[in-house]
Image: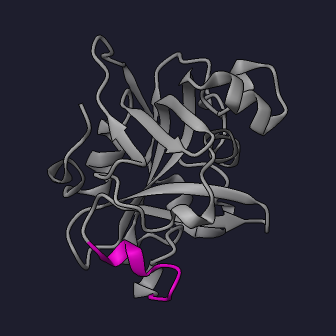
Amino acid sequence: MKLKRNFYVSSGLAVARELIGKQLVHCSSEGVTKGIIVETEAYIGPEDAASHAYRGLRTDRTEIQYGIGGYAYIYTIYGMHICMNVVANHKDFPEVVLIRALQPTAGIKLMQNRRQKQSIRELCNGPGKLSQAMGITPNCYGMDLCGKELYIETVSGIAPGISVTERINIDYAGEAVHYPWRFIFTNNKFISVPPRS
């Protein structure tokens, strides 16, 4: 069942946790791809030095974060890797959830062609990788996740254990580096980076 608006109109931390075990779906002109969400990170607006909305920054790029939850916030890092985020919370609460890794479940051959990779484990074990595999592009910015093209759905029979760790690759963010706002499907081999021991 496709997630409805009320799922997203909650705190970014709650959405980040609850997305684990849900399934991301992209219906593109090339075909349908799907993957179970196994890793997320929450970015909590003006007080979070790792957030694009830190100190209330509001630009054309970040504007979608200030709307109601349930829309796609897409951006590019290092000039090449596309990251997909889910907008959470109410209007004017700029909180997002970065989807960091998926366990591919459908459209795997299409994912392999897009990534030029055969290893299923390596198709979506990172935010840039999963965007490439799923065919998520900057054109997906602002898409309604309650629509028919890019959305998230529940999957029966999945009740993941969830582990909580510090976020990764945000060394610039001062004390925010240590916030425990990364959520992973416990013992899932498709996550991007194993938790620190």
Residue 7 point in image, percent of width and height:
20, 47
**The quadrant where residue 197 appears:** top right
Image side of residue 178 versus residue 77, left or right: left
Residue 119 point in image, percent of width and height:
78, 19
Q: Name the magenta segment's main secondary structure.
A: loop
Counting the numbered discs, the total is 0
**The quadrant where residue 71 appears:** bottom left
Which of 38/197 is in front?
38
Which of 144/42 is in front?
144
At x 55% / y 45%, what residue is drawn? 28
Instruction: Look at the picture and state if 55 lies above or below 49.
Output: below
- The N terminus sits in image quarter: top left
At x 79% / y 61%, what residue is drawn? 80
The colour scheme used to paint the residues is one colour
- Tell me the magenta residue range: 58-67
Instruction: Look at the picture and state if 96 lies above or below 164.
Output: below
Image side of residue 176 versus residue 44, left or right: right
At x 34% / y 73%, what residue is drawn? 94
**The quadrant where residue 134 appears:** top right
* Residue lying furthest left: 6
Q: Is residue 65 magenta?
A: yes
* Residue lying furthest front: 29
Residue 103 point in image, percent of width and height:
55, 24
Image side of residue 165 versus residue 13, left or right: right
Q: Is residue 173 magenta?
A: no
Residue 27 point in image, percent of width and height:
49, 42
Question: Can I make out residue 196 in this image?
Answer: yes
Question: Can I make out residue 165 in this image?
Answer: no
At x 60% / y 56%, what residue is drawn? 83
Which of 44/159 is in front?
159
Image side of residue 151 versus residue 129, left or right: left
